[in-house]
Amino acid sequence: MLAKNITLLTVLSALTACGGGGEGSTTDTGTPSSQTSTYTVIDGYLGNAEVYVDRNANLVAESFELLGNTNEKGEISVEASDDDYALIVRIIAGVTTDSDIDGTVAFNKEYVSSSDSKVITPATTLARLNDMSLASLSSALNISPDDMNADFIAAQKHKAHVLNRSLNLLLGETLDTSRRSLEEMLQNAQKISDYIGTQPPATDLTDLILVINEGGDILHSTPKKVHNTQFDLAGMTLQWEQKDYSGVDYTDPDGRFFHPCYMSEFGADLLLVSNCYDEKYLTLDTHTGAIVSVSPTVQNNYLSYIDGDYVALVANDGNITYLDKSLQPANPSAEVLKKEKDRLVAGIGKWAYLDKDNIFSRILRDSPEAFLKNKHLYKAEAMTYRYVGEITSFFADGSVTTQQGVPSSTIRNAVIAIHNASSLGFTANSDNTRVEWLAPNVYLTRVDTEQRFISNDYQYLYFSDGRIQYLGQMDQGFWMRGADDTTIIYYDVSKQEGEGHLFKQFSLKTGEELAQWQRTAQEISANLYGHLHTKNGLYTNSNSYSTIIKFK
């Protein structure tokens, strides 16, 4: 493989020396025109990326050269007068969208155009930095120049797509950073290209990204996993379990010691935990599960919420006191509090609404008219769904908006018709078919085979555009969002012989089952009643077993 890497560097050097499409020459473009050209920035289609015209040719994205941002298809229009200049693209973590992941990217990158192409990609970046054309680089990498110079997503040129996805990981945050490791990037580009060339024709490349690990091995992954936008349920492992609260000085009104109940992330490294009476609070280290801090016992606490670096405790009379990150009483100034003037705040394990008279009224997690129990957070602080199809969003400033969704009767009737036309053998009707709102455009419909009892039910996803996806026959279980933005996770537990814990992960876009994870009751004895799904992992607890477990 080393010989091949050296060969690529030799070829690239020769192409540059003889002017093989290099960027150093200029082309007479003729009379200036008022026409524009459309450039497309692709790894997946990269939307909301900043584009700069490098008029001073220093390969630095400078504020006075900013042209604008790409649209959701990665496109931007450029005046013909700027066609002679390189275009620099800044891809910004958490801001730039990528069609490969249905979300925002996790890494800052910079791309630059090549003079012979209207696509801007990791490959054009590698070509420009090596002072050669995209066509020459493509030939050196033994991949079709036409495929690399095209919108390879629309043209379904999967090898070009996989190569560019994988090259993206090799690039630095800035062009200067990439240029300083150019030789290593060229060697790895050849390695990746050679590997792609060895794949059998039947290999599915549609969602593949190749990652070179520290040992130099090539590993298969997906864009969503690389950008941490899709939780890897199948690869989930138990990170830690905390069940020793012997050092916590507390007895609840029922005469029991501390039992964990409500959980919330508290900054990057702490998990805040309270008991069900909201009288005692702990923080756990999210990496190890070790107890970090313990609060004094709090009396007459109505609800609590996190406000920046503080825990706000709301008493029955509406008076608010605070605990700092060490869970000791504190008196923060108004300047450091972010939610003091909010009329709606997310409580720890509950939701709280603060009205104009500064009196909290509580919306319980299990409120049937409010979709709160799954902690589905959108731009609104809370959203509710009514059976008539009305979706209401509540915001922190107290404002409320309402939009029309799909009435539950429409969903129920459509699923009943599909189910009864199938060969599943159980008759669905309006009495045994339940509808639950999962996301703004997605609804769960469950045909209950044994009403009033936990039963093995037929479950469907209904999408607001009318699509229906059968998920399978499963126990009632419950559904959680939060591990990522594109999937939903089902959980159920059974202590019957040979059964145990079952997690299933489904796409919120198609309803496809993506992964499942199972463990026996002997491996994990606790029934995991409480769940907090986050991008840092799944936190689960069992009040009866007094345990908190983190999976990742």
Image (cartoon, helix red, strand yellow):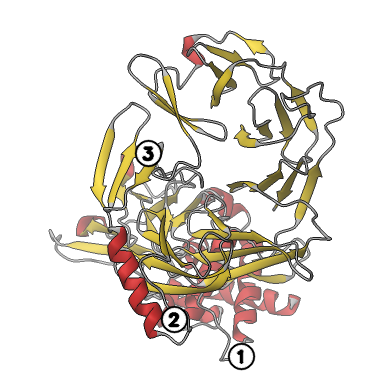
Quadrant that contains the N terminus? bottom right
The quarter of the picture where residue 493 lies is: bottom right
- Residue at 32% of width from left, 59% of height from top? 408
Residue kind at label 1, given as amino acid type: Pro
Q: Secondary structure at mark 2?
A: loop
The quarter of the picture where residue 406 lies is: bottom left
- Residue at 52% of width from left, 34% of height from top? 350
* Disc 2: CA contacts within 10 A as few (<14), some (14-19) or many (>=20): some
Mark 3 lies on residue = 380
Mark 2 lies on residue = 157
Comes first in the chain, label 3 or label 1: 1
Answer above or below: position of 292 versus 479: above
**At which x and y percent is residue 360?**
43, 21
Residue nearest the viewer, comparing 455 with 230: 455
Residue kind at label 2, given as amino acid type: Lys
Residue 200: mark:
1
Give the CA distance from mark 1 to mark 2: 15 Å
**At which x and y percent is residue 95?**
43, 46
Q: Secondary structure at mark 3?
A: loop
Residue nearest the viewer, comparing 210 with 427: 427
Residue nearest the viewer, comparing 66 with 435: 435
Comes first in the chain, label 2 or label 3: 2
